[in-house]
Image: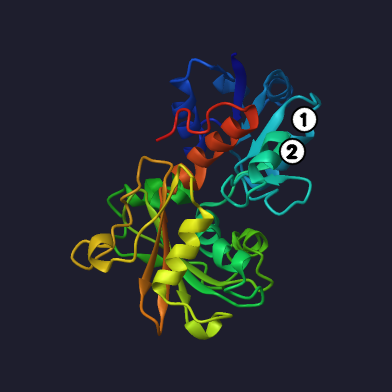
């Protein structure tokens, strides 16, 4: 069977990579909009409603506008913006979130693609909160380091210009990052995390680090216990690997490689530390599982085709 797919915002970073993923597939017919009609509402509406799946790779307000153009009840919309991620009428597009999440994605016509930082944070913390090891009212401190491609075309142009800054740059220092609502909602935490991201002078790759103290736990647990809890939660998940607790094996001479999952849809989860203090680290490609790869994975689940089709 062939599915018709339209990418609204196909010239952006996420849209371009979705197109790249799908152009190689025999089961997908990509609907293209002429360059001079990209802002033509009538043409966008025609293509959206002619599609089985439309990806919205647009700023929040433009994504909301595109949703108003949908009048075909069979068109599934997968929104890569922040606009609908905590809207209860939309399904969160993270299949690994919970045992019933794939069924929800399969049944839904409105799917919100997770944010890159949020995906890593949620996948690291969700097993501990679901188990009760971390109480829902715990305020978690975390940071993230990410490649500059996550900032879109303007940031990419800046970093690839002669005037680029080569040092890491912390941002969102007001502690109100736009991913906070989904990080809180889908871990089940009642307190927003203290979260501070950093842009690094590299194109892509992302690692979120969450800081844990055993006093935050509901029972005694060491790194091996936390690792087993996470491994059991994600047992059988094709895109998630929970690494054994092994500092030497999980680093390169003690240094952590943020870019090791680039060009994949994989997530690696690690527990570092000791019985007195621990780190949870989640590593992914911010343009893969953090954006375009996740969107294609959600589409595959929704359509009922092989979940890993077109992904590595």
Q: Is residue 79 above or below residue 3?
A: below
Element at badge 2? helix
In the rendered image, the vertical position of residue 198 relative to residue 148, given as above or below: below
Q: Name the spot of residue 47 as percent of width and height, x first.
A: 68, 20
Residue bearing mark 1:
69
The number of numbered discs placed on residues in the rendered structure image is 2
Q: Secondary structure at mark 1?
A: loop
Q: Is residue 286 visible?
A: yes
Q: Is residue 191 above or below residue 180?
A: below
Q: Are marks 1 and 2 in contact (CB under 8 Å)?
A: yes
Residue at 62% of width from left, 62% of height from top? Answer: 187
Q: Is the C terminus in the top left, top right, bottom left or bottom right quadrant?
A: top left
Q: Residues within 10 Å of mark 1 (few under 14, many from 20)?
A: some
Residue 72 in the image, given as x and y percentages of width and height: 79, 24
C-alpha gap between disc 1 and disc 2: 7 Å
Which residue is denoted by mark 2 in the rendering?
A: 65
């Amino acid at each position: 069977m062939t599915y018709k797919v339209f990418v609204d915002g196909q010239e952006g970073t996420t849209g371009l990579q979705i197109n790249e993923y799908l152009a190689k597939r025999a089961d997908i017919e990509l609907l293209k909009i002429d360059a001079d009609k990209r802002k033509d509402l009538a043409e966008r509406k025609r293509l959206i409603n002619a599609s089985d799946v439309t990806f919205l790779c647009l700023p929040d307000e433009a994504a909301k506008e595109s949703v108003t153009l949908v009048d075909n009840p069979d068109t599934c919309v997968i929104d890569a913006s922040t606009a609908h991620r905590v809207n209860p009428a939309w399904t969160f597009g993270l299949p690994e979130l919970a045992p019933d999440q794939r069924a929800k994605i399969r049944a839904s016509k409105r799917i919100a693609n997770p944010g890159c930082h949020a995906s890593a944070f949620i996948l690291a913390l969700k097993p501990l909160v679901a188990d009760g090891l971390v109480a829902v009212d715990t305020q978690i401190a975390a940071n993230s380091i990410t490649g500059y491609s996550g900032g879109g075309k303007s940031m990419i142009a800046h970093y690839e210009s002669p005037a680029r800054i080569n040092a890491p740059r912390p941002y969102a220092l007001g502690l109100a990052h736009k991913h906070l609502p989904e990080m809180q909602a889908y871990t089940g935490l009642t307190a927003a995390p203290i979260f501070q991201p950093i842009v690094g002078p590299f194109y892509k790759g992302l690692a979120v680090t969450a800081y844990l103290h055993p006093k935050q736990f509901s029972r005694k647990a060491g790194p091996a216990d936390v690792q087993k809890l996470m491994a059991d939660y994600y047992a059988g998940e094709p895109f998630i690997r929970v690494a054994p607790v092994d500092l030497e094996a999980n680093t390169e001479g003690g240094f952590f490689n943020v870019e090791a999952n680039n060009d994949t849809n994989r997530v690696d989860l690690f527990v570092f530390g000791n019985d007195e203090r621990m780190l949870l680290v989640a590593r992914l490609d911010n343009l893969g599982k953090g954006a375009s790869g996740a969107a294609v994975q959600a589409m595959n689940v929704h359509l009922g085709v092989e979940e890993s089709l077109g992904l590595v």
